Image: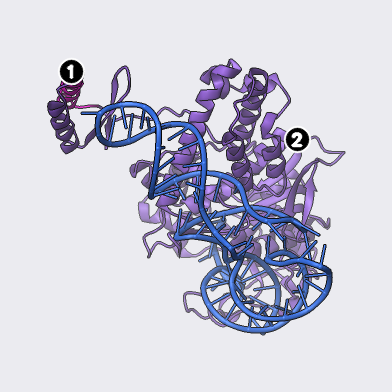
Chain colours: A purple, B blue
Amino acid sequence: MPVFLHDTMSRELRPLLTKPDKASFGMYCCGPTVYGPAHIGNFRTFILQDVLRRTLEAFGIKVKHVRNITDVDDKTIRGALAAGQSLATFTQGWTDKFHKDCTALGLLPPHVEPSAVVHIPQQVAMIEALIKRGHAYVAKDGSVYFKVCSCSDYGKLSHLDRSKLQTQDTNSAGQANDADEYDRESANDFALWKAYKPEDGENFWPSPWGKGRPGWHIECSAMSLEHLGATFDLHGGGFDLCVPHHENEIAQTECATGIKGFAAHWFHSAHLLVEGDKMSKSKGNLYTLEQLIEKGFTPNEVRYALISGHYRTSLNFTLHGVENARSAIAKLERWVDRILPVAGFSRAEFIAPQVHEIQTTWGRFAPAWEILQNDLNIPGCLGQIFTVVGEREDPTPAQSRQDVCGLAKLLQALGLVLFVPKAEAAIPVEVVELGARRWAAKQAKDFAAADQLRKDLSALGWTMLDRKDGYDLKKA
RNA sequence: GGCGCGGUAGCCAAGUGGUAAGGCCGGGCUCUGCAAAAGCCCCAUGCGUCGGUUCAAUUCCGACCCGCGCCUCCA
């Protein structure tokens, strides 16, 4: 059974397979706009795409994953000017930060990560093709707009009825949404090329229509065409990108190339709620990975929390949820630690990729793998993993070897890592000393003194966990 | 107005035409000088409401109630 995934356009579950004439499965994902730190909502989408890619690879499909960097648009230009930096310097800084977060979260680097700025010639060529074919027009100020009414099937992704396309009189900022003001023929038309304005500073590029910069939507069309061709296998992004971004991408590419069938499959992930609220800067609930690390969570725990809901259902991200993730991971680690000696594997072997190649079996985790392949049901898969973990009877060595291999492969598909060494806080000298004295008192059966020393330790914010043969000191 | 999503235990969250996975929390037990950790056990006769279809519905159909998203920059 192949991997099945819900497709936004056809609204049905469809198999994901490489075309017979293609060497790999082409997957394009709309990447970040690098004008600030990406927040966990952005990362939920990228992590889900990463799990999809890993799942396809675990299934044996060779994937070509393309995810762009949007490094020219209103926000990046505004940000660079405000920071007094060149656009390139400004966006490189945020790109580096993005890459650092991605690595921490266990995201595999895409095979190609195109920059919009680097692909401006391709965008200009595409706009020229659109004008030539009668799908775009040049406005008085030198801007170029896409003529939506020239594209008969515009809106097919989200099943918009073009005759009922309604553009509101005002936008969310309360400003008039008036076609005349923008020199557009229709308020539905969108910019392919934006003529230079003084507030753009030094950020402009030459074009047949004068200096200016590309519109946002054309960037993705040009980059996907360049790296995956006029048609490819899957296009992903957040649900909010459906309209208008992805509708526009379809229209641009299909009208420019004359080839229908832009992306064969559309993968959209639902948005995140934070503590029950929509995420927004004004509510102060817009977490970045860095903020969560400051709160003491690991990126691995954040990743677990972000994938613990189905991708088509909005997930309520809470701090409590990350704590749940931490407990769940710890439970998994304990189980693996218990079964590893039975299977004859070490922790290092469990984490090392060669273990995954030893056997092709999934052991008792085969059902979990089946569930994951059915519409990327990660919560269902995790539930099944814990069902196995909770089984009463201990497996035989042979069985546990298969289980270990199966679980290792499954965790690799989910991108979750066990036994991540945690940076333990340094233990102050006085705490070490108090601990030693309490242990001595306990050995001497002077329990009154031992209890007092425990109290002293907790007053300093430390707890002492006794084992048979010693003790651990932990920050409370 | 158009398109779409959801309502399952204290919280989070799967799933199925045949009587509710899993995680967290909570409770009990074992262990333990104490405390913790760990292990074991328990924890929804119920899946928004009301009808319908059915031998059987939380699962299908209809109506309704509630919450939400998009149509406007946004993962």
Q: Which residue type does callout 2 highlight? A: Ile
Disc 1 element: helix
Which residue does the numbered mark 2 point to in the structure image?
A: A61
- x and y percent of residue A397 in the render? 63, 18
Give the left or right position of residue A336, taking residue A265 as reference. left
First in sequence: mark 1 vs mark 2: 2
Q: Which residue type does callout 1 highlight? A: Ala
Q: Within 10 angstroms of label 2, few (less than 14), some, or many (20 or more) residues?
A: some
Please say if B6 is above or below A318.
below
Label drawn at residue A348 = none
Q: Is residue A211 visible?
A: no
Please say if A75 is above or below A418.
below
Magenta segment boundaries in residue numbering? A427-442
Q: Chain of mark 1?
A: A
Q: Residue at x 25, y 27 (%)?
A: A426
**A202 vs A271, nearest the viewer:** A271
The quarter in which the N terminus of chain A is drawn is top right
Q: Chain of mark 2?
A: A
Please say if A146 is above or below A427.
below
Q: Residue at x 18, y 31 (%)?
A: A454
- x and y percent of residue A250 in the render? 73, 59
Which residue does the numbered mark 1 point to in the structure image?
A: A440
